[in-house]
Image: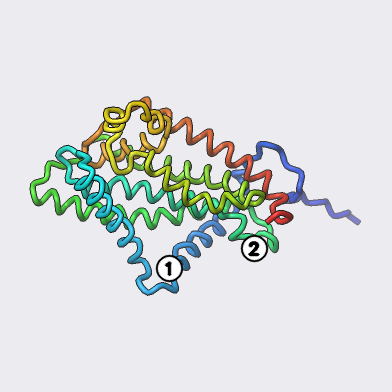
Amino acid sequence: METPTEQPWLYTISSKRKLIDFNFKELWAYRDLLMLFVKRDVVTVYKQTILGPLWYLIQPLFTALTFTLIFNKVANIDTGTVPPFLFNLAGISIWNYFRSCLTATSDTFRSNAGIFSKVYFPRLIAPLSVVLSNLFKFGIQLLIFIGFYGYYYSKGAPVSPNSSLLLFPVLVVLMGLLGLGLGMFISAMVTKYRDLKYLLNFGVQLLMYTSAVMYPLALMREKLPRFAWLVEYNPLAYIIEAARYMLLSVGELSLQGIAFAIASTLLILFLGIIVFNRTEKTFLDTI
């Protein structure tokens, strides 16, 4: 009588993990769950609101209008030949994608504590779903920008994209990965230091002002050279400046700045995944 041969295990779940463990094969195996999380994030965010997805339209429009009144009309920040509202809307649209990824992923462990404690799946699925679901919101805001772009173009405004626009998806990916890396790092820290949760919104506001969202990068170097390093050492500033250059042909496309942004993004993402993986083993004891 033949003895049954033992079949190899498909997965081994253990609390002992390597310091650096990027199990992309397991993430791919759970891709269906990732899509379910993305659908959940898109559908449930504004499900019980009156205006629903219209908030995707209202927020960037009112923010761009506020920036135009305060920074361009009152503070007289010059945007060159580009209409100030369109200039601000371009920066706000891509900034909002980063901000949404950062704030949502920074709450990963607390908001998913219930499901994390009941069933196993790669925990990285949760923050990844946030980055992908926010692409839907970013797509809507980009359509708004295209609509106003067409309006100003029909009115004779000297705005035009350039050939480097083909690299615009690279900037979007960089924004998403940077928000993912920072968000995972903060999410891991929040499980032990709750004060970070209250400081996050304040910190994001400060970060926006040092990311050249509402002013050209060259203006900071000209008007406040002593504090220009706050912007020049911020990878977000180069990404937003490059996005405006691609969309409106205003500002500059610094290859050195983009290289710095790519290197910074990969480093932050690498450190974020390491800290996230180490925290997921013990966060239920401290959450």
Q: Residue at x 8, y 47 (%)?
A: 156
Give the image quarter of residue 144.
Answer: bottom left
Q: Is residue 123 left or right of residue 236?
A: right
The secondary element bearing badge 1 is classed as loop
Name the outermost residue toward the left: 156
Q: Is residue 22 left or right of residue 13?
A: left
Q: Is residue 187 left or right of residue 19?
A: left
Label 2 Cα crowd, 10 Å radius (few <14 / some 14-19 / many 20+): few
The percent position of residue 125, horizontal first and vertical second, equals: 57, 53
Q: Quadrant of the N terminus?
A: bottom right
Name the outermost residue toward the right: 1
The secondary element bearing badge 2 is classed as helix
Q: Nearer the viewer, residue 105 or 160?
A: 105
The percent position of residue 6, horizontal first and vertical second, equals: 82, 51
Q: Quadrant of the C terminus?
A: bottom right
| Marked residue nearer the N-terminal end (1 or 2) | 1
Q: Nearer the viewer, residue 16 or 28?
A: 16
Label 1 Cα crowd, 10 Å radius (few <14 / some 14-19 / many 20+): some
Q: Which residue is mark 2?
A: 115
Q: Residue at x 59, y 37 (%)?
A: 271
Q: Is residue 283 left or right of residue 137?
A: right
Give the residue type that dot 1 points to. Tyr
Mark linked to residue 46: 1
Q: Residue at x 43, y 55 (%)?
A: 134
Q: CA distance from mark 1 to mark 2?
A: 21 Å
Give the image quarter of residue 276.
Answer: top right
Give the residue type that dot 2 points to. Ile
